[in-house]
Image (spheres, rainbow, N blue to C red):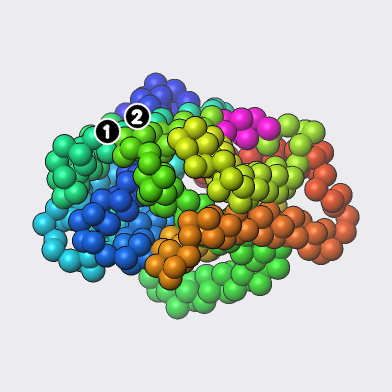
Amino acid sequence: MRLTRPDKGWSWVVMVASFFIHGLNGSILYGAGIIQVSLLDRFNRSVSLTSWAGGIFIFFMSSAGVIGSWIINRWGCRTAFLIGSVIMTSGLIACVFVKSLSLIFLVYGFVAGSGSGIIYTTGIVVVGLNFEKKRSIATGFASCGAGVGVFILSPVIQLAREQYGNCGVFFVMAGIALNMSVFGALCFPSYLEYYKVERHLADINLSVSSLSLSKKKRIYERVKVFANIPFFLICLSLFSSHVGIYLMYVHLPNFAISRGTSGFEASFLMSITGIMNCVSRLFIGFAGNSEHISTIILYFGTFSLLGISTMLFPFYGSNFVGQAIYAAFLGTYSGCCYVLLATITPNLVGLKNLATAFGIEMTFTGVGTLIGPPIAGFILDSGGTYEASFFLAGSSAIIAAVLGLASEVFHQVSHPTEAFISPENDKLFKEESQQQCDGIITQ
């Protein structure tokens, strides 16, 4: 078998395949608001109860990365794409036939969400295993597929709902999920991936006799990372921010419809968030690489602007124009943290503990996405208003911004020789981190 070398030949096909996989997966992920409207019509239950479906889906999408990583290490990225696609497709098809909302929580939230998480993780990893010198460019291009997919496919999902009903729309979504396996099949193993899997299998054979001591070491590493106060504050920041972010993603379409916006226009709001999310990730990536800008300042600023625009949304969101303006704000500022964490996290915990730290961060993110939408639903069902839930969402984003800044303050206290949020030191660390990451993946 001829293996692809990094940055050459078939690696570019893998990058394009990952772009389309991100697009298809993102359209279903960020279409949670359209699904929320569908479930309200289909089951005629409370807003808070139906909101759990989207929350559970996003939670397992965030949490299934551990499973995805294990599949990749054991069998490779192509197999991981196939398994994730089949799981996700099965869950969405089951949504057509189930008769109770509790079963929707299981097949849509747990099953489809887990499949989506496996695909999401693999879509990121496969690019890293095919590129070295041009990894940042390739990763940025591939991740932009999510925004493009939401922009194009959100109206398609809404039209499918209008054409085929609240049950039939899940068939269309299942077809979208199944097509991810087609693009995943194009991701033949590269030189880096092949030897990564081979080394993992060798490590398994060597560690069988000392399994207990391996377990103890991993537990110690996790406890050590979790006890890091600056890192813990970042985790709390991610939890707080995602309480608000996915509260808005799930409830924005239904709010718009309640204010007289058509269903198709409401779905177009999701398209706006998608394309702005795509553009903002590119710009924040370039800004984060600047020697004059600190990533922690960008982290604080993006969440602050998101919080302010959300708290003020009731004053300008009574018509479609105002709703479209807010959708642009939501898309622009809600996804920047994922780009910035690639620098912030290793700066706090070191490269050795990076994988453990990302796993913990995604858990906090998942819990935030799980409880945010139902909290808003509870406010509405208890006689409150959308305005009150939007104030909660905006406050959560601002708290997240403050916690991010507090993390840097505590980090400075424990590392007094480092300049406070120094752009120069930030740039040096980024360069060193990239070099060390390249070495780790190449080994």
Q: Residue at x 32, y 46 (%)?
A: 34
Point out residue 250 in the picture as x, y percentages from the top left corner: 40, 52
Residue marked by disc 2:
152
Task: Please say if the residues under marks 1 and 2 sit with CB atoms less than 8 Å apart.
Answer: yes
* Residue 429: in magenta span: no
Residue 287 visible in this rendered orientation of the protein = yes
313 shown above or below 163: below
Answer with left or right where residue 219 lies relative to residue 95.
right
Please state which amino acid type lies under the numbered disc 2: Ile
Q: How many labels were placed on the picture?
A: 2
Instruction: Decide whether the magenta segment is chiefly helix, strand or loop.
Output: helix
Residue 64 visible in this rendered orientation of the protein = no
Residue count near mark 2 (Cα–Cα under 10 Å), binned few <14, some 14–19, many ≥20: some
Point out residue 387 in the picture as x, y percentages from the top left corner: 53, 55
Highlighted magenta segment, given as a residue range? 280-287
Point out residue 129 in the picture as x, y percentages from the top left corner: 45, 38
Residue count near mark 1 (Cα–Cα under 10 Å), binned few <14, some 14–19, many ≥20: some
Q: Which SS class for mark 1?
A: helix
Point out residue 355 in the picture as x, y percentages from the top left corner: 53, 56
Task: Find residue 156 and name its label.
Answer: 1
